[in-house]
Image (tube, coloured by chain):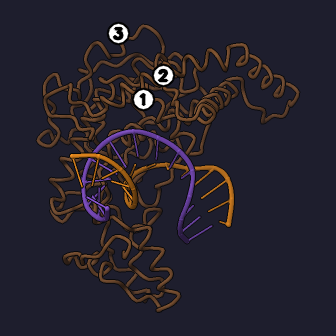
Chain colours: A brown, B purple, C orange
Amino acid sequence: MPQLSSGGGDDLGANDEMISFKDEGDQDEKIQENAFTERDLADLKSSLVNESETNQSPNAVSEHEKTCYLTFFCCCWSHSTVSKHQDGGMYKTAYPGYPFLMLPDPYIPNGSMSPSSNKVSVVQQSHGMHPLTSLLPYSNDHFNPSPPHLPTDMSQKGVHRPQSQDISGFYSLPQGGVGQMPPSMGWQSQPVYPLSSCGFRQPYSSSLPNSSSYPRFSHSLMLGPGMHSTGIPHPAIVPPSGKQDHYDRNVKPHQEPKREKEPKKPVIKKPLNAFMLYMKEMRAKVIAECTLKESAAINQILGRRWHALTREEQAKYYELARKERQLHMQLYPSWSARDNYGKKKRRKREKQQDSTTGGKRSAFDTFKEDGAPAPLLPMEAL
DNA sequence: ACCCCTTTGAAGATC
DNA sequence: GATCTTCAAAGGGGT
């Protein structure tokens, strides 16, 4: 199980995957040499160019976008046609050290975790910062990866956060730990602009960051929409409204309106794992670079990028995820992932029950609301 | 309105 | 202990 030990760098969870990934990457390089030559690529690209040239509509995609689509197509082609050879090799050399910044803040009001704005635009997502991003030596003030077609100032609007909420008790980083980017992976030592997610180099216009100049903490947990019983808010507590209201279907639609207005028991979500944290941070960037919107496609790219990361780069996210779990455990010591288990099946069953029995509730549903010990039922019975 | 897709990782469930 | 299942995020697309 990928788990980063508190002290050892060699305990990185992705060891096996990194090894296998490298093999896959090598295989893919060969495959690319044999099956998809540069000429093929150029032909395909030129066909796209011709296609757009013949279509002189105002909405014609730019060369940049075509390149994005093309590369993404190649990724998909390689991924699907070459079956299980996940071509991390496409990115293996492309992202030697990628700056991560555009991490949305799910823990702040109006953030992406906000029930009313869970589905937010790319621009909105870029406003905030993940609470644990404060562990990262990055700042939107120092690095703005915004592509030219997006607003450059995406760090001002809609974020209201105290400037120096020091919760170092929770998140204090070990000196020299992975939370602090070592010089070898710092951007200043990165001589080449990283390739975009779509395989082209795109220099960043802003100056490179200096980790020493970042605020120690600006922890938006203190402002999150969820409020723990201890008074400590946390994003994992999701009010049962908005998109995430599907996690609280215990309230039947036929219930009295008066009851519906009562504050509902919030749902405590699972802490994000390393890859999820990475996705949250990089999603906006991929969307901006590739003008893709479908999350499934974006996640494929992000998955490939994740494999292309070095161990040190991944370690940063494993460490963040570890701290996320630690904080989650501290805030909700009695919480278990089981609490959120079986929701899909239960929802379906509830629907069927509603149609047949008029919405009679199960013992597990009662457990969920009352906090009583869960009945020992097999998962299928849920 | 709701579910699926798609990714990786963590954790619970099952065998 | 190994394997399987579910859920975290995200948002377009399909029903």
Q: Residue A216: horizontal and vertical position, in percent?
A: 21, 32
Bin the neighbour count of mark 2 within 10 Å (Cα to Cα): few under 14, some 14-19, many 20 and up.
many
**Label 1 near label 2: C-beta < 8 Å?**
yes
Which type of secondary structure does the marked residue at label 3 adopt?
helix
Q: On screen, A145 above or below A118?
A: above
Residue placed most toward the observer, A343 or A379: A379
Bin the neighbour count of mark 3 within 10 Å (Cα to Cα): few under 14, some 14-19, many 20 and up.
few
Disc with the residue nearer the chain's start (2 vs 1): 2
Q: On screen, A185 above or below A164?
A: above
Chain on which label 3 sits:
A
Circle 2 is placed at which residue position? Answer: A25
When asked about the image quadrant of residue A274, the answer is top left
Q: Work out whether disc 3 and disc 1 sit on a shared chain.
A: yes
Kind of residue at badge 2: Gly
Kind of residue at badge 1: His
Mark number for residue A307?
Answer: 1
